[in-house]
Image (cartoon, grey):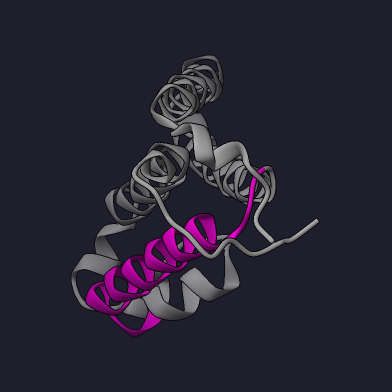
Amino acid sequence: MNLLSRRSSPHRVWIVLPAVLLTISDAALTLLFQPSTYWSGEFATAHEISPLGAAFLHIHPLAFGAFILAWASLIVIIAFRLNEPWNRVGVLMIVLGHTAGVFDWLEDLSYVGALPAFFIAALVTVYCWRRSDAASPAWATIPSP
């Protein structure tokens, strides 16, 4: 089984879309829920579980934004380069991780209110992957040499 794909196709956009959306959602909530001291310039007061995300938040919010852009780009590259089903496995790992991040921020408001984050993430993932399967050309199922 070949792990890397030599071709890309538009249907792969649908495969990676849930991971990118969850990454952006998690990052937006991360910035939204920073304490007022953070926004007054005390970047050392940033709250973030991810050590890498926290490191960039401690530098500046724009550094965090640049990190998120780089991370989302890496997700897209990986999803486009890996063959089926490995691209979906990688995307699903990202979806699960960032859904947990979204849940973590929202649970501070309400545990029960945060539970729909998992349902919405699952719904978006299934919808996008069904769109991907419908848009997949017949040659996409042929194993590459």
Q: At 68% across and 43% down in the image, what residue appears?
A: 85
| Residue lying at 45% horizontally and 65% vertically, measured from the top left | 77
| Magenta segment | 58-84
The foreground one among 139 and 106 is: 139
Quarter holding the N terminus is: bottom right
> How many numbered tags mark residues here?
0
Q: Residue at x 37, y 44 (%)?
A: 13
Image position, residue 58 (x, y; %): 39, 80
Q: Nearer the viewer, residue 138 or 53?
A: 138
Report the side of 63 relative to 39 (left or right).
right
Tell whether position 74 is magenta.
yes
In the image, is 128 to the left or to the right of 90?
A: left
- 144 vs 40, nearest the viewer: 144
Tell which of 61 and 46 is nearer to you.
Answer: 61
* Outermost residue, right side: 1
14 to the left or right of 28: right
Which residue lies at the image location 42% right of the left edge and 50% below the top edge?
Answer: 23
Residue 118 lies in quadrant: top right
Q: Position of residue 65 (x, y in %)?
A: 28, 69
Q: Residue 95 in the image: x percent, y percent?
A: 55, 41
